[in-house]
Image (cartoon, rainbow, N blue to C red):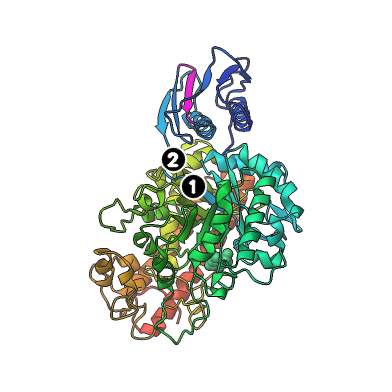
Amino acid sequence: MTYTNCWLTYPLLVDETGKTIAVSSEFTGPVADSALEELKAGFGGMYRRSVASVAGEADIALKKNEKIHPEGYRVTAGNGKVVLESGGERGMLYGVFSLLRQLQLSGGSFNDFSWQQDTAPANPLRMLNHWDNMDGSIERGYSGSSFFFENEEVVVNQRTKDYARLTSSVGINAVVINNVNVVKAASWLISDRYYGKLRQMQEIFAAYGIDLYLSINFAAPMELGGLTLSDPCDPGVQQWWKEKAKEIWQKLPGFGGFLVKADSEGRPGPFTYGRTHADGANMLADAVAPFGGKIIWRCFVYNCRQDWRDAKIDRPKAAYDNFMPLDGQFRDNVILQIKNGPMDFQVREPVAPLFGGLKHTNMMIEFQIAQEYTGQQRHVCYLMPWFRQVLEQDMCVPGVPSRVADLVSGRSYGNQNCGMAAVANTGNDLNWTGHDLAAANWYGFGRLAYDMTADPLDIAREWVQLTFGSNAQVVDTLTAILMDSWPAYEKYTSPLGIGWMVSPNNHYGPSVDGYEYDRWGTYHRASHRGLGVERGRTGTDYCRQYNEPLCSLYENVDTCPDELVLFFHRLPYTHRLKSGKTVIQHIYDTHFEGAEMAEGFLSKLEAIKNLLPEDAYDRMHQRLQHQMEHSKDWRDIINTYFHRISDIDDEQGRKIYD
Ligand code: GCW
């Protein structure tokens, strides 16, 4: 059995055997070769037509046009002719992938196809972060083992290329292949031991317009270099990194840069030496600057040894508290990477206030498609509707366009070192993502990062059609499941923005009190009087990290959106939400509804059994079956917990186990 091609399926549309497609190209080099190869795969598959390079008159003309963005393209197709222009080879390749996608979606012959598009990417950096370890395991990986590493070796094979094709086909232009938690084995990635293999991988990526990045250990000068310290202000340490950077770019020309998790969850960092994050990031930035390298510095910094008894420490405040005082101190080639919310990839969180705070610092957003807290690729949870909401959130910065989309794309302050990253959801499973439907998040993230105005519904439909064909019943059914999946997951898990309620370590629920008395700063503080955390000025004062009028909107319980109300407020069970329901009734209703939706997913899938490939059907069926059962666990455990603690009955008298 071989692995799937995900959405690059190119099924036969019309048999036009015998008619060659002539392609002329003003581009040369590896990316141009990839484009030609993709055209061959697409036209061969969809039309049984061969593709030939020609110098003159062509059916498909790939042209250079300096006026067009190097990662954008302009295309006109009609009457069996295509003219595709771009300012660069990446844009040309994206145009080719789009052309093939549009042809497949059209379902008809090449001659009848007409299409026009003129587009450029919304974000400069469109990045995947893999949390793959050198032993082949993947931190928070739910789709098998790594295809980048095995037994402390870098793996380069056909799958490397197919990964690059899939990733590039949706416009992703940068990839970090190793875990941000860089343990000793991975520190050695930036040494002679691995450059050879990394160079091979990098060439494969480069032919698909993807820059290779690595996560590094801040203490590498000690682990690799035998130095006694890694103080960013120490001249010996600075020199070590300068030489290291020189070596890396010599061995890996075109290398992108480093992703750094420092002073976070036990990782080494500048704090050890009484230095700031700016000292740490700038030291690395100076070392890589001569080679055009970037330093992506994560803001996931908080006290992970909190005492739950201490209600004054409030974890969501941490990133802002740590990084706001440093605004304006970072070098131009440093980008702060900020998780979408102030907690950690929960099913619902407010947007991290740092986005609205930093004004003189490059930033990018970090999403997670690995579904660590959203069903772990066992539950279906299509995240693009959620990401789109996050991107649309206005952070109310005076004087500049300040939706998250504006801030991370560089529109607000006119910068170029910024964009979107996602923690990836791939592994060596045959279908790449464990759950076949989880591939929609990989596909969708790329599409959304390229075009932040894309409609998540269109993305879902497109993905279903490309992956499973254009049978209307299949497309409607699977699209509906995808679109209902995030709302369903939110309903049957933790209520009203409170988050967590999972077991520590594996992060799978339900476990209402799983984190309650632990050191991680993630508490719901439920009692018979109520639940939630007061984060206005009478509480932890977290709200004040938002600009007005957002701050007041969240702080005032009457204007705070229902879906976040327990994140921002501690409320009695009888509190009436804007929906008109009490908190407790909302909990009961959503949990019954959510589990019912999950049950519906299974029966919907069963109704299209004969229209799907057997193996894909079986895999999805098994997972949706688990989801249905697991959602009932969630429903019953949450409902019972809150029934017991509130002693308030369900108005509808449904079954709650006491
Ligand atoms: O939520 C935590 C995850 C860790 C992860 C960390 C991070 C890579 O549980 O597994 O470490 O976030 O984002 O750094």
Q: Which residue corresponds to mark 1?
A: 125
Mark 2 vs mark 1, CA separation in Å:
9 Å
Secondary structure, mark 2, is: loop
Residue at the image point whose x is 61% and y is 65% from the top: 235
574 shown above or below 155: below
Residue at the image point whose x is 29% and y is 50% from the top: 401
Please indicate, yes or no, whether residue 101 appears anywhere in the rendered image.
yes
Please indicate, yes or no, whether residue 372 appears anywhere in the rendered image.
no
Q: Is residue 346 left or right of residue 580?
A: right
Ligand 1 falls in which quarter? bottom right
**Is 356 part of what is drawn in magenta?**
no
Residue 51, horizontal then vertical, whole percent: 62, 21
- The region drawn magenta spans 79-87
Q: Quadrant of the N terminus?
A: top right
Decide which of 499, 173 is in the foreground and name it.
Answer: 173
Outermost residue to the top? 57
Q: Quadrant of the C terminus?
A: bottom left
474 shown above or below 362: above
